[in-house]
Amino acid sequence: MNITINQAAIESVILEVSDAAAAEAFYTAAFGLGDKVRVRTSEAPTTGFRGFILSLVVSQPSTVDSLIGTAVDAGATTLKPAKKSFWGYGGVVQAPDGAIWKIATSSKKDTGPATREIDDFVVLLGVDDVKATKQFYVDHGLAVAKSFGSKYVEFETPASSIKLALYGRRAAAKDACVPQEGTGSHRIVLGGSVGAFTDPDGFAWEPHLASQ
C-alpha cells in the first residue's frame, strides 16, 4: 500500500448516535470542536465500554474545569471528577450518547486567564494486542511517534489533525473508571486519509469528506 506518511491522519471523528440532533447540540455546547466531531444516526446494538476514549489535551487546569463544566451543564455524566495527580490535572465525563471524554493537562497550575483552547485532540483506542495493532497501523502508513512496548503507542500526525493512540483495553477502561466489558458496535468511525478499512479490534475508518 503506497501511502505517504504526511497523508496518514484522522480529520474527523464520526460518532454514531441514537439522536443526531441532540448529539450535535451537546457537542456544540460542551466542547465547540466544529467539524472535527460529526454525528450520524445509528441503532447498532452496543453495551458497556465501547473500547475508546476521546481525549482533549489543554494547557492548564482552568481550561479543564471550563470544558468539563460546559459538558456537564449540557448533560454529560462525570465518571472521574477533575483533580490533580502526579502527571497533571484532569477528569473524565461521559456524553449523553455514551462516548467517553477525558479532558486533561500536564500542568498543575494556571499560568494565565482561563481559556477554552484545545491543544490536542486524541483518539485513544483500547485494543486487545497493542503490538499487533501498532504494526497494522504502521502497515497502513502511520509513523510511530511514541511507543512503550505493549502498553501505549502514539502515532505521528500533521499538526492540524486528530492524533491516534493505542492503549490496552483493560488499561483504557481503568483510566475511564468504567468496567472493561462491552459488546456490540463501537459506535465510532474515523474519517481520514488512509482509505476505508477496519482494524483488528473492529474500529472502522472511511475516507474523510470536507462536508458530510
Image (spheres, rainbow, N blue to C red):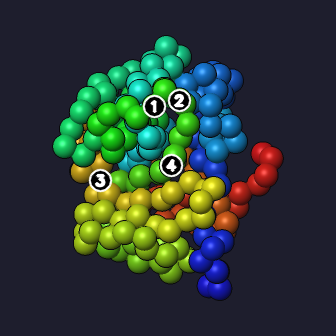
**Marked residue nearer the N-terminal end (3 or 1):** 1
- Determine which quarter of the picture holds residue 17: top right
In the rendered image, residue 186, in percent from the top left (x then y), is placed at 47, 46
- Determine which quarter of the picture holds residue 180: top left
Would you name the residue on which mark 3 appears? 169
Q: CA distance from mark 2 to mark 1?
A: 9 Å
Q: CA distance from mark 3 to mark 1?
A: 36 Å
Crowding around mark 1 (Cα neighbors within 10 Å: few <14, some 14 to 19, many 20+) is few
Numbered label attached to residue 112: 1
| Residue most extreme to the bottom | 2
In the rendered image, residue 172, in percent from the top left (x then y), is placed at 30, 48
52 in relation to 192, above or below: above
Amino acid at pointer 2: Thr
Crowding around mark 2 (Cα neighbors within 10 Å: few <14, some 14 to 19, many 20+) is some
In the rendered image, residue 163, in percent from the top left (x then y), is placed at 51, 57
Amino acid at pointer 4: Asp
Secondary structure found at label 4: strand
| Residue most extreme to the right | 211
72 in relation to 170, above or below: above
- Determine which quarter of the picture holds residue 159: bottom right
67 in relation to 152, above or below: above
- Which dot, 3 or 1, sits closer to the camera? 1
Amino acid at pointer 3: Arg
Q: CA distance from mark 4 to mark 2?
A: 14 Å
Would you name the residue on which mark 4 appears? 120
39 in relation to 27, above or below: below
Amino acid at pointer 1: Gly
